[in-house]
Amino acid sequence: MSDANVRIPEEAKDRLAAVAAAEGLSLRAYLARLAETLLTPAERAERAAQARAALKAWNGYAPTATEERNLDDELDRRLARVSDQ
């Protein structure tokens, strides 16, 4: 296993270390686990394509690109409203 040096603000490092410690992990172990759980943009796009295909096969739902954008915008509006509370 190779090591890497990553320069981040001290506050960010301290916060990550505190989260790791609360989970009983070293910062190194926590970051390794985090890296394993995150998806790359290509992986997210592939999962989205699989979800769209599954919905279409299941019930024929196949939104257009415009409908998808409108739904994304609506979700963003709702999330913003909830986070403002």
Image (tube, grey):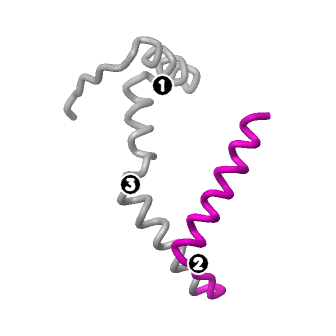
Residue 80, by quadrant, is: top right
Q: Few, some or many C-alpha atoms within 10 Å of disc 3 (few <14, some 14-19, many ≥20)?
A: few
Of the pair 49 and 25, the residue shown nearer to us:
49
Q: In the rendering, which numbered label is found on residue 41? A: 3
The structure residue drawn at horizontal position 48% and vertical position 25%, both measured from the top left corner, is: 25
Q: Residues within 10 Å of mark 2 (few under 14, many from 20)?
A: few
Q: Bounds of the magenta span? A: 57-85
Q: Does residue 22 sit above or below 31 in this rendering?
A: above
Mark 1 / mark 3, whichever is N-terminal? 1
Q: Amino acid at mark 3?
A: Pro
The residue that label 1 is drawn on is: 25
Closer mark to the observer between disc 2 and disc 1: 2
Mark with earlier residue (2, 1): 1
- Residue 8 against residue 54 in the figure, above or below: above
Q: Quadrant of the N terminus?
A: top left
- Within the image, what quadrant is residue 83 found in? top right
Q: Amino acid at mark 2?
A: Pro
Q: CA distance from mark 3 to mark 2?
A: 21 Å
What is the spatial separation of the Cα atoms under label 1 and label 3, in whole angstroms?
Answer: 27 Å
Dot 1 falls on a residue whose secondary structure is loop
What label sits on residue 63 in the rendered view?
Answer: 2
The image position of residue 21, as x and y in percent, is 52, 19
Residue type highlighted by circle 1: Leu
The secondary element bearing badge 2 is classed as loop
Residue in view at x 51 percent, y 18 percent = 15
